[in-house]
Image (cartoon, grey):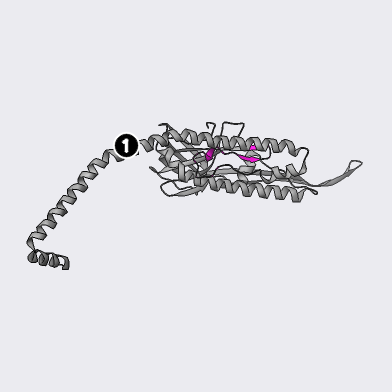
Amino acid sequence: MSLWDDLKKKATDANPELAAKAAQALSKAKDLVAEAGQKAAPVLKEASEKAAAYASEKTPILKAQALKAIDDAKVRRAELKERAKHDKAARDEMIRTMYDISLSAEDPNFIDEPFNHYDRQLCFFVVSGQVLDSQKRNQTHLSASHSHSSGGGYMINGYGSVGGSSSSMHVSSHNIQEHEFWVHLADGKEACFQFADSNVRIREGQHISMLFARPSDSQTGTMVALYNHNAEANYSICSAAEINQRFNLYTVEPGLFNRTEVTTTRSRLLQELERRLGQLAKYSALHGNVAVQGQLIEGNAQP
């Protein structure tokens, strides 16, 4: 017998009437709690429904506010760019704030925030879904090179000598692992994706979010990253340097007199682009799973 049971027995033996009243009061208190819970249930349900309705009503407002912040930033950049034509201080300010953003990765509308580099603009969108099938296979690619050389010689008045000639061919091969997978998208369609990358790890049944980049004047995007929600892992498909080359953001080669300027500009671009990719990875982790559950998350333009 526990100490508590022993104390209850002693109290009952000492005053049975008082113990009975205490038990009756305890039982009544339990009934009151149950009754209060039953009465509170409809109130809590109503409050929950009102909160959901309020959130539903507020979502378009928040999106409109986010898009307005992006548009306002675009206007400020345009004004600064115009002033920069005649004002060195304005140009310095334009360069300094070129990569500034208005939203954070926690904001569901962050995907609408473009990446700006002078006159070039890169947009992003995310496509999410469930992996249906994933396969990797090795492809062998052959390349060949041919060289030909002829010997020297001389001819004088029809007499002389000519050296021999030779030719050679070199054949080389290298293996590329191609990754192909099918995804059931949030809109119910199935799509096949493919890229050459051996590091991405996904399997059937897992939920993924694929990040695409596209120029502002194009509707076609290139996959640059993939987030596996089940594994909580982000995979880079294209590095910042590869994205720069693919979309020709800044491919100026340094010369004798502009080496420092070109190198500094390129380094800053790659650093800021890498930072944006990190922010977009966080965005995919936070909001990509919503798309899997039925709402496709994309930027302003469709892929």
| 10 Å crowding of disc 1: few (<14), some (14-19), many (20+) | few
Q: Quadrant of residue 41?
A: top left
Name the side, left or right, on which 135 lies relative to 151.
Answer: left
Q: Image point 57% across, 34% down: which residue? A: 68
Q: How many marks?
A: 1
In this view, 295 is above or below 238: above
What x and y, as percent, mark residue 177? 51, 46
Asked if one can make out residue 185 in the rendered structure from this viewpoint, the answer is no
Q: Position of residue 132 (x, y in %)?
A: 40, 39
Based on the picture, tell me whether residue 107 belongs to the magenta stretch.
yes
**In this rendering, would 206 be left or right of 18?**
right
Quarter of the image where the N terminus is located: bottom left
Question: Mark 1 = which residue?
Answer: 46
Which sits in the foreground, 37 or 84?
37
The residue under the point 20% across, 46% down is: 34
Looking at the rendering, the stretch of residues picked out in magenta corresponds to 103-121
Q: Quadrant of residue 22?
A: bottom left
Closest to the observer: 71 or 275? Answer: 71
Q: Is residue 271 visible?
A: yes
For image coordinates 30% across by 38% down, the residue present is 45
Find numbered disc 1 in the image and state the secondary structure of the residue it sits on.
Answer: helix
> Which residue is situated farthest in the right direction here?
157
| Magenta stretch holds residue 203 | no
Percent position of residue 5, x then y: 14, 65
Q: Which residue is pictured at 49% across the width and 34% down the height?
A: 61
Residue 44 at x, y = what percent?
A: 30, 40
Residue 226 located left or right of residue 80? left
Q: Is residue 64 left or right of residue 215?
A: left
* Type of amino acid at the residue the image marks with label 1: Glu
